[in-house]
Image (spheres, rainbow, N blue to C red):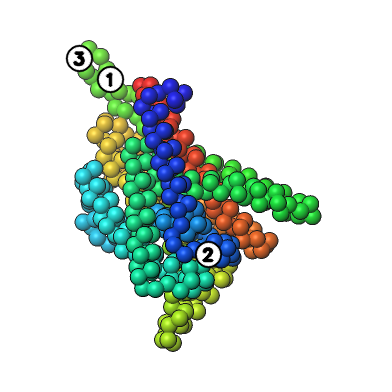
Amino acid sequence: MIFMDKILRKRVVFVLLALVAFRLLANIPIPGVDITALERVINNNQLLGAFNILSGGGLSHLSIIMLGVGPYITGSIIMQLLTIMVPRLKSMYQEEGELGKKKFTQYGRILTVPLAIIQGFSLILLLSKQGVLGDLTTFQMIANITIVVGGSMLLMWIGELISEFGIGNGVSLIIFAGIIATIPQNISQFIYTFEVAKLPMYIIFLVVGLLIIAGVVLISEAERPIPVTYAKQVRGYGNAGGVQTYLPLRVNQAGVIPIIFGLSILMFPQILGNLLASSTSSILLSISKGMLWFVNNSYAYAITYFILVFLFTYFYTAITFDPKQLADNLQKGGAFIPGIRPGAATIEYISNILTRITLVGALFLGIIAVLPLVMKGITGITSFALGGTALLIVVSVVLDLIKKVEAQLSMREY
């Protein structure tokens, strides 16, 4: 059905070609990499493993796109946080239409450059101290930072091209492709290390994985319908309107974005902690110890992760869904919610419903995000925590992609 539609077929082929280019770039390493040391560091470090997920697998090869879309995501988070404190940015993003959103996005791109420089310098210095890159001269450090910053900007451009000329969210699809690319290696590693004595543990992992998938599907598809009636209008010799329909509000308006946001924020304590560990200042050393304690404390990490996912779910929903705009559109279209007055009463009614259903979505998404970490604490297997996060992202991206394809097909049909 997809390939029978010429326009949709072109979009799908474009996405596939863009993802192939991304995977080729992800296998081009920067100079002087010790692959064995790199695998050891990533496998023994949970947050670097999480960063590898966000980079689309680029960090596992220390490739030229090792930063992935992380700086772009961080820049987007900062810009959206600024909309709360800067009314001009909020007006630009929500009220000035497509032109305002283009300006807003451009500011996010500009902010990506210094963030990529900071993250690139921090990661290269961190990995150099752990023997992955060895001792770098000043020239080599500058050259590597320039390479990875350029790679990150290139990947950001590819992601935006996918969003514009392909189908689905380009950033999410890049992360998705990076996760999917690791499946063959994980399967072969599982077969090689399989032990019959650990069969009950494998069954538990499988059950938890299926529960995560079922939970994500359930929350992503759940909706709260709001009844809407269109007023009757007399036009010529006939009547128009009087139709009753409903407005579906999704329980989880934010999708997988809160998970990505949460992981992006949690990377900073480890990077800063390791950078400050070599400082001669007692104050900076105390800060470094506190950050590294947080990173190594599973309970503190899990609680913070849950809170971040919970808050970002509300925050992103508030940014992307405006009850006032929805109420105004209903009023302009001659529609109303039965029993609710148009205007302020409708805005309050929709806002109250949205707050309640988002509470359910935020709690469930936070629990699903933390559940693999709890299993990791019980079993001591770090890869399971990372696998749970990856599974959560993959399922959410697949659901979103299916909806985008169905929307395109429906648009072509009608």
Mark 1 lies on residue: 240
User: Do the CB atoms of the residues marked 1 and 2 lie less than 8 Å apart?
Assistant: no
Give the amino acid type for the residue marked by disc 1 in the picture: Ala
On the image, the x and y values in percent for residue 197 come to: 79, 55
Q: Is residue 90 left or right of residue 285?
A: left
Give the amino acid type for the residue marked by disc 3 in the picture: Gly
On the image, the x and y values in percent for residue 369 come to: 54, 55
The residue drawn where x is 36% and y is 59% is: 147
Mark 2 lies on residue: 34
Residue 46 in view in this figure: no
Mark 3 lies on residue: 236
Callout in the foreground (1, 2)? 2
Q: Secondary structure at mark 2?
A: loop
Q: Quadrant of residue 381?
A: bottom right
Q: Quadrant of residue 97?
A: top left
Picture mark count: 3
User: Do the CB atoms of the residues marked 1 and 3 lie less than 8 Å apart?
Assistant: no
Q: CA distance from mark 2 to mark 3?
A: 79 Å
Give the amino acid type for the residue marked by disc 2 in the picture: Asp
Callout in the foreground (2, 3)? 2
Query: Dot 1: within a 10 Å radius of its alpha carbon, few (fewer than 14), some, or many (20 or more) residues?
Result: few
